[in-house]
Amino acid sequence: MKSFVTHLESAIDGTQLPADSLQTMHKDRPLWVRYDLDAVRAAMSKESLLQRLPDLWRYRELLPVGPDDEIVTLGEGMSPLLPCPALGKQFGLSDVWMKDESQLPTGSFKSRGQTLAITMAKKFGVKRVAIPTAGNAGGAMAAYAARAGLEAFVFMPEDTPAINQYESVASGAKTFLVNGLITDCGRIVREGKDAMGWFDISTLKEPYRIEGKKTMGLELAEQFDWQLPDVILYPTGGGTGLIGMWKAFAELAAIGWLNAEKMPRMVAVQSTGCCPIVRAFDAGERFAEPHIGADTIASGIRVPAAVGDFMILDAVRESDGRAIAVPEENIIEWMNLAARLEGIAVCPEAAACVGAMEMLTKDGWIQPNDRVVVFNTGAMQKYPEAMATDLQKLDKDKPIDWDQLQTLNTAE
């Protein structure tokens, strides 16, 4: 199957760049991958998808790989879209769903971006890659780099969840803990580029992670039979997923598969502990000021400054959406609530979205009959620090008070 990519395009000023060579950014801002959508429309049909494997690569015409490119894959299947009636009922909503990205190969949605980023890096002859990460991206990059035979360097804040540290090391990446935030890690990667000769796989600093992330939107549209939901709640740090989905919906509308007049309202969800996008949204600004002193248990959204800030804010505003910060102190409570009501092991970032759903329903922005989708971007099990709880103990040598046992709530 041929590639339908025509060129790369600067997101800041529209400058066109060739797609047949290694590219990073333009004027220190991200690039879009652009396609010949008329040719895609002629080559691809909804019916043809039904004959393909249920994986990320089923949307090959809308991805940047060519016919001779070696795909670096760990078997990225379509993540399930799960109805959540009990969670919806909790907040007076009748049509709530969760897209569970935790079932992807590396336990989070980061598999999507890294399979594309590493595939394209290898295609263009990259031998060494580096990434700053606050959570799941480092482990995912390390895994796909190992799969591709590339040397990997991972830099993460020293308080990054332990599981993320272990998985980077286990996949063979040279992994370093930094006494700072992801922005400090990013500076190290940037400053080491010439001395180390590595390619920077940071969020939106190469054009292909967004193409992997946009498959969340492609899948969601297909799973809802090409009728998009009313609201999408998405945890937003670097924002690649939200930006990617909005791009996916635009491309699907351009080929006639979606009604351009019926797009979802995109909600960028952050924590009060780190909310630069929310502050910019509330102030009516297109660019966000860095959040000083960023601190949240939801490590994936602890991003004080996003290189794609204006792309996030553009998508939110174009969709008539919102940017909202939820109280940091309630995130673990929402995490336990979702798991208890639906049995879905949601990560702290998804728990923030559960909180946003509650808040936006209370203020009337989300209506009782709206179809609402929450993205669970990673597995709860990757955040043992957030899962810690005081369990009740039983003494095997003493009688058990069965009445008291029935009243205990171990989730509190």
Image (cartoon, rainbow, N blue to C red):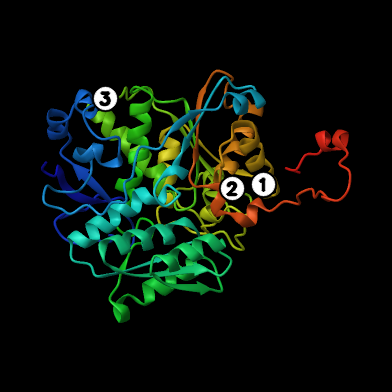
Q: Residue at x 21, y 62 (%)?
A: 122
Q: Which mark is residue 348?
A: 2
Residue 12 seen in render: no
* Mark-to-mark CA distance, 2 and 1: 7 Å
Q: Secondary structure at mark 3?
A: loop
Q: Earlier in the sequence, mark 2 or mark 1?
A: 1
Q: Position of residue 31 (x, y in %)?
A: 28, 53
Q: Secondary structure at mark 1?
A: helix
The answer to which of 42 and 367 lies nearer the viewer is: 42
The answer to which of 156 and 105 lies nearer the viewer is: 105
| Quarter the N terminus occupies | top left
* Mark-to-mark CA distance, 2 and 3: 34 Å
Q: Amino acid at mark 2?
A: Pro
Residue marked by disc 3: 257
Q: Residue at x 21, y 40 (%)?
A: 60
Q: Residue at x 86, y 51 (%)?
A: 397
Task: Classify 10 Å Cα crowding around label 2: few (below 14), some (14-19), many (20 and above).
Answer: many
Residue marked by disc 1: 332
Q: Secondary structure at mark 2?
A: helix
